[in-house]
Image (cartoon, grey):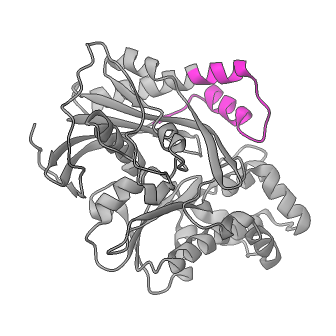
Amino acid sequence: MRVIGLMSGTSYDGIEAAAAEFDLNGDTLRMRPLGRLSHPYPERLRSGIAAALPPAPTTTEAICVLDTGIGQAFADAGVRALAQLCGGHADLVVSHGQTMHHWVEDGVVRGTLQLGQPAWIAEATGLPVVADLRSRDVAAGGQGAPLVALFDALLLRGLPGVPAALNLGGIANITVVAPDADPLAFDTGPANALLDAAVRHFSGGTEEYDRDGRGAAAGQVNPVLLRRLLDEPYYRLPGPKSTGKELFHLPYLLAALADAPTPDPQDVLATLTRLTAVTVAGACRDHGVTRLVVSGGGAHNPTLMRMIADELPGVHLSSSDDLGVASDAKEALAFALLGYLTVHGLPGALPSGTGARHASVLGSITPGRQPLRLPDPVGTAPHRLRIVASPVAD
């Protein structure tokens, strides 16, 4: 089955599209990546997303406009992926949508909202669309995140030692795959969320992120500010747990700076980068991680990667590219895999990773141009993921 995955993360800078062919053979799921592309959001849409994100107030009108605009942008990305990555032929599109709110109270996720009406994608591509993948896990008592945990567990299973996958998006999440134990996954805290907010604030909106980590590299960590940030109770919660920009946003940072003034913006960036490194390293040490496979936008920040390495001497750091999965495509491929499981009647969430009462088949399906015909259900869930370079069986 040929599947297109569409993903936009908490940095909301655009849509990553990736396509792959999947073939389930016994307990092994074979995946042949077909490529990836980036589809930026129009500036007006991106500004609308930023204006509606917590802690800003919003309206139902704004949410309706964004649901349509994001859906149309995802549809455009899907059309491009169908033509450029799939030669005009695919069987399914899987859309993560754009997370706008992740409702957490006392460590319990009450709801999660991803916008991007899938009808626009189905109409534009003519393909069935699996969307809204997080809500079913939340309904089953889970965090609804991180849903990449199943992909990570399948990919890392069998590697020596205690491997873990780290994704550095707006929020950092980790999946630990220890031998003879259920995989554990959770959000460790901010990766780029506070960094990006700081850069936009200090640049007056002329810069979006700390390009190549240059600002942080030029600054010095303020230990007082770092201690203030590490006082955040979230870091002491046990996993499974999840968080988002509902907590880690600009007013949160400004409150910390009021308590620990740091006049030099570069020192703020250095401290925020060290915060990510310290919280990631703490999670790795807590679970005896011996190998860390990194992906996501933060993997391109050499200052952040150097700080993580400094905090984890003796832990082997590598990129998901080394395992055959392009770092920038991993989340889109992970959601493509989840959609593949959905249409085959297989669960896509790991209760040990999300805290759900049971594993659930995820998402809702929007039919394409043709009558909806689902594959025959599969009784055996995959136990491992094999990345292949040659065509898989039809």
Say above or below: 98 vs 128.
below
Q: Can you say which quadrant of the picture contains the N terminus?
A: top left
Residue 92, given in percent of the width and then of the height, sits at: 29, 29
Residue 141, given in percent of the width and then of the height, sits at: 54, 47
Judge left or right: residue 392 versus residue 274: left
Q: Can you say which quadrant of the picture contains the C terminus?
A: top left
Residue 239, given in percent of the width and then of the height, sits at: 56, 64
| Residue drawn 62% across the image and 27% down it | 45
Judge left or right: residue 20 versus residue 73: left
Observer-nearest residue: 60 or 258?
60
Asked which quadrant contains residue 311, the reply is: bottom right
Observer-nearest residue: 251 or 149?
149
Judge left or right: residue 307 versus residue 163: right
Residue reaching furthest to the left = 393
Q: Is residue 240 visible?
A: yes
| Residue drawn 64% across the image and 42% down it | 110
Observer-nearest residue: 213 or 288?
288
Judge left or right: residue 331 versus residue 225: left
Number of numbered discs visible in the structure rendering: 0
Residue 44 is inside the magenta segment: yes
Q: Which residues are magenta?
A: 39-67
Principal secondary structure, stretch drawn in magenta: helix
Say above or below: 40 vs 358.
above
Q: Is residue 307 visible?
A: no
Residue 382, given in percent of the width and then of the height, sits at: 23, 52
Observer-nearest residue: 306 or 254?
254
Asked which quadrant contains residue 362, the reply is: top left
Residue 296 is inside the magenta segment: no
| Residue drawn 65% across the image and 26% down it | 44
Residue reaching furthest to the bottom = 314
Say above or below: 71 vs 330.
above
